[in-house]
Image (cartoon, grey):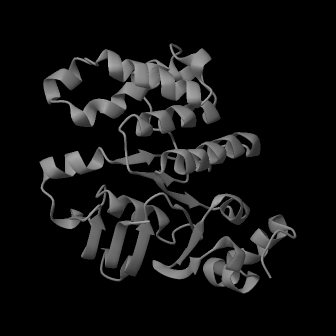
Amino acid sequence: MTTLLELKNVSKQYGKDTFALSGIDLSVKQGEFVSIIGPSGAGKSTLLRCINRMIDADGGEIWFDNVDIMNLRQRQLRQLRTRIGMVFQHYNLVNRLSVIENVLHGRLGYKNALVGSLGIYTEAEKRQAHELLGTLGLQDHVFKRCDQLSGGQKQRVGIARALIQDPRMLLCDEPIASLDPSASKIIMEHLRNISKSLGITVLVNLHQVDVALNYSDRIIGVNQGQIVYDGTPQHLSLEKIHQIYGSEAGELMMNFGGNHAG
């Protein structure tokens, strides 16, 4: 498998003394499913947002598909972002628009401003949107307004919108944080299937250790802006979980049951 994403010594500072990220080294292969876990405020969201430059890192290098993204100008960055889909915790949908209109917004990165503002899409794009919604179990909701959907359905619309970009990588920022366990399970299974069947690299921020263990090829543990664990689910010991979560670890263990590695 070829390396798709590489971060070298990446840092991000807020204010004078607060490092959101410090000395991040990370290499991710094409088609890998990677979960990033850690306590709130550990730097997980900052890390994802630096990768597609929603936030600019202060130092280091970020390479995606052999392109140095830190030095891209705005137009080049727009092109790059068509290949990096983003799935958000709070969906970022336009509630008054229909499901299919929201999905088609994923194609805007490929269009000039005029065509995009007029909402002109090709028949092939509309067909692809229908197919994606069918794959995600939303074929009966295509023309519903998004404010009529449940949270889990909204998140599946968000995934379809990311996939219609034809991305090589999906960045998912706490995609199940607002969902109940059954909706969370559906979302995680779709994300894993996307990774396995389409060969798309998936990076997903999670707060739930058990979910990371069940779905990931690899787990990255982040604490105070630094990577403190990088390995397989099988090797994530209780000791490592304590290292990642600090004082929060005890509470996590209560929910964790006996599903951990020794």
Q: Is residue 119 above or below residue 88?
A: above
In the picture, measured across the screen, residue 83 lies left or right of residue 212, that is left
Residue 137 screen position, x and y as percent: 62, 27
Based on the displayed image, in which of its 4 quarters is residue 110 positioned? top left
Image quadrant where one finds the N terminus = bottom left
Q: Can you see residue 135?
A: yes
Q: In the image, what residue occupies the spot 59% across and 24% down?
A: 138
Q: Can you see residue 96?
A: no
Image quadrant where one finds the C terminus = bottom right
Residue 202 screen position, x and y as percent: 49, 55
Based on the displayed image, in which of its 4 quarters is residue 66 positioned? bottom left
In the picture, measured across the screen, residue 183 lies left or right of residue 69, that is right
- Farthest residue in the right direction? 258
Q: Is residue 240 above or below residue 118?
A: below
Residue 24 screen position, x and y as percent: 39, 79
Residue 144 screen position, x and y as percent: 53, 15
Q: In the image, what residue occupies the spot 34% across and 73% down?
A: 7
Q: In the image, what residue occupies the spot 13% across and 47% down?
A: 75
How many marks the image carries: the answer is 0
